[in-house]
């Protein structure tokens, strides 16, 4: 493989990755804790868009609420990780073509 072909492939890959990152910024996942008492909405770039807390979650105390928020955030992050892996795998899988 010559250097020109290699550079063209690298540029193509860079363009595809950039497009995938832009796409991930518009995709959303929801992390849920305690049957929906706390819901974290996050993009595929880990940007937290919103945190919704059911009023009934407030009666469990600050410590429990903190745990629910952390659990919902981690759930959203795990789902975003899967989304990112799937999106990037589609790109890297096409490299062998």
Image (tube, grey):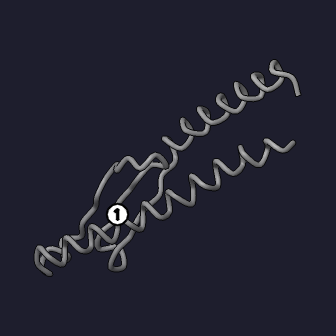
The percent coordinates of residue 85 (x first, y second) are: 61, 55
Residue under the image location 26 percent in, 67 percent down: 69
Q: Nearer the viewer, residue 80 or 32?
A: 80
The percent coordinates of residue 55 (x first, y second) are: 18, 71
In the image, is 79 to the left or to the right of 86? left
- Point out the image quarter for the N terminus: top right
The residue carrying mark 1 is: 73
- Secondary structure at numbered mark 1: helix
In the image, is 13 to the left or to the right of 62? right
Task: State whether residue 77 is above or below residue 61.
Answer: above
Q: Quadrant of residue 97?
A: top right
The percent coordinates of residue 82 (x first, y second) are: 56, 60
Residue furthest to the front: 2
- How many labels sit on residues? 1
- Crowding at dot 1, Cα within 10 Å, few <14 / some 14-19 / many 20+, comes out as many
Task: State whether residue 91 is above or below residue 8.
Answer: below
Residue under the image location 79 percent in, 41 percent down: 95
In the image, is 12 to the left or to the right of 23? right
Residue under the image location 86 percent in, 23 percent down: 2
Q: Nearer the viewer, residue 16 or 32?
A: 16
Residue under the image location 50 percent in, 62 percent down: 79
Task: State whether residue 36 is above or below residue 29.
Answer: below
Q: Quadrant of residue 68?
A: bottom left
The percent coordinates of residue 65 (x first, y second) are: 19, 73
Residue furthest to the top: 4
Q: Quadrant of residue 6?
A: top right
């Amino acid at each position: 493989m010559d250097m020109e072909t290699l550079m063209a492939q690298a540029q193509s890959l860079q363009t595809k990755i950039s497009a995938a990152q832009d796409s991930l910024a518009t995709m959303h996942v929801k992390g849920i804790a305690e049957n929906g008492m706390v819901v974290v909405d996050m993009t595929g770039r880990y940007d937290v868009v919103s945190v919704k807390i059911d009023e009934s979650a407030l009666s469990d105390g600050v410590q429990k609420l903190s745990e629910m928020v952390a659990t919902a955030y981690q759930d959203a992050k795990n789902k975003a990780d899967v989304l990112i892996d799937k999106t990037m795998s589609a790109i890297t899988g096409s490299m062998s073509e």
